[in-house]
Amino acid sequence: MKESNNVSDLDIKHIDPTLYNEDLAPLKPQDRNWGAFEIFNVWSNDIQSLFGYTLAASLFLTYGLNGWAVMAAIILAGVIVMFLVNLSGKPSVKYGIPFPVMVRASMGVRGANLPAMLRAIVGIFWYGVQTYFASTAVTLLITAFYGAGDGSTFLGLSGVAWMSFVIVWLFQIAIFWQGIERIKHFLNWAGPLVYVVMLVLMVIVWYQAGSELIPAIGTIFSGGSETRGSSIAAFMAIVGTMVAYFAAVVINFGDFTRFVKTERQMKLGNLLGLPLNVAFFSFIALIITAGTLVLFGEALTNPADIVERVDSLPLTIVAALTFFAATVGINLVANFIPPAYDLANLFPSKISFKMGGLITAVIAFFVGALWLSVISQIGVPGFVNALGAVVAPFYGIIVVDYYLIKRENLNMQELFSSAPGSAYYYVNGWNTRALIAFGGAALFSLSTVLVPALSALGGFGWMIGAALGGLFYYGLMRQFKAAPALA
């Protein structure tokens, strides 16, 4: 199908202040300066963040599988996510619009606020959690120089930890306030540096563990009592959990691809950043996790804890700075930018992109502060699956709507119009068919996480929700004639 990216198509001719501001407007091709390297770094920072490593390492230990099998499951998840984001990112490469505008085509110009707000809630939660994880690196750095303090704590955090948390929180706001270009530059140097530190840490652990390490990979992680059927179920549960980890980025990938000049650059960045990057990083995580069991007699899943045990001041300094940088990088891109857009979409004339980001930061402060003492107690994989399941149906709805219902054609003028009878007005601005599809799918996908009788499907909450959302939506919308082709 012929692409229609003409500048005239992307100029919104009639401004509706309830739907439009400069931050939500289509970004013209000449104003985009992201390529494959920037997309690669979105993923490299996401995977290499402290939370990403902790999740990967915990999966080696949670399911009792051989370490190599867990690594294969994580890589398979990377391939699946690459396929998913190629689909969800393409519309925004074509039209230059962020997720909350893109979703108007399926949910309605007013109904789009529902997925936008749910996505904002997920983003704010992740933002608070990642801020805490980034602060652990700063805590490590301060402790290395000045000591840990008197040992007193509040909500599970020491005085040094609280100071570190506030420093990271303020630093992220300062970077965000300088705009997307500064975030891009920060991301581009932060991600690659983490690889260097992780490689150094892997070599040190491997050297210290010696000949015991390789046998440990095949035996230490294994529970030894699984049947073949339960092993396959555990393998697929790991795949599902890792897909759910990326879910927040998958659904709103258009927030990033709107800055990319061509679809080819997006796909190359996704290939390098997902299956290839995940393969390399999961290998590092596998070696280090096995090494900590050999060396310390217990599994350490937070790199900051591992660096602390290794007890090398130069490594502590470099590791703390790079872990901090990478975690802050993905936090800004994956968990700050999307809620900022989503909140701006609620009241475009009153909430700018920057104001949306500030609201995000304030709420996320309390999430991060309560992470250690309250939120983390439900378990990392369960936390990831529950949040992912809530927004999952929107992925299926968006993809089915764009490729099967709208046939890859959107009317830019009508995406910013609330006039009755316009293409995406539906019923008072809401697509009731899409709401029904979302409700049915979300109920089932969330129940796989919360209902004990369905616990066997726990790792598949996101994928089930996305598939059902798309299936229900197609069944309800295939006879519905909605959007005309581009004006």
Image (cartoon, rainbow, N blue to C red):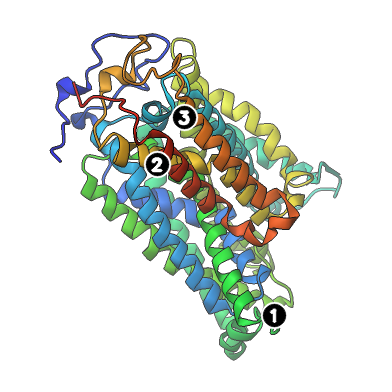
- Amino acid of disc 3: Arg
Q: Determine whether 210 is above or below 292 in the image.
A: below
The residue that disc 1 covers is 223
Nearest to N terminus: mark 3 or mark 2: 2
- Amino acid of disc 2: Phe
- Amino acid of disc 1: Gly
- Quarter of the image that includes the N terminus: top left
- Quarter of the image that includes the C terminus: top left
Residue 416 at x, y percent in the picture: 33, 17
| Numbered mark located on residue 433 in the image | 3
Residue at x 31%, y 53% (from the top left corner): 269
Which is more toward the observer, 225 or 202?
225
Instruction: Check the image and name the residue furthest to the front.
Output: 479
Please identify the quarter of the rendering in which residue 288 is found: bottom right
Residue at x 71%, y 52% (from the top left corner): 143
Q: What is the C-alpha distance between the residues marked 3 and 2?
A: 24 Å
Residue at x 25%, y 37% (from the top left corner): 408
Disc 2: CA contacts within 10 A as few (<14), some (14-19) or many (>=20): many
Q: In the drawing, does residue 125 fall left or right of residue 355?
A: right
Which is more toward the observer, 455 or 352?
455
Q: What is the C-alpha distance between the residues marked 2 and 1?
A: 37 Å
Can you tell which of label 3 and label 1 is closer to the viewer? 3
Q: In the drawing, does residue 93 fall left or right of residue 245?
A: left
Residue 207 at x, y percent in the picture: 56, 82
Q: What is the C-alpha distance between the residues marked 3 and 1?
A: 46 Å
Q: In the drawing, does residue 472 fall left or right of residue 237?
A: left
Q: Determine whether 355 is above or below 128 in the image.
A: above
The residue that disc 2 covers is 253
Please identify the quarter of the rendering in which residue 54 is found: bottom right
Nearest to N terminus: mark 2 or mark 1: 1
Circle 3 sits in a helix, a strand or a loop, which is it? helix
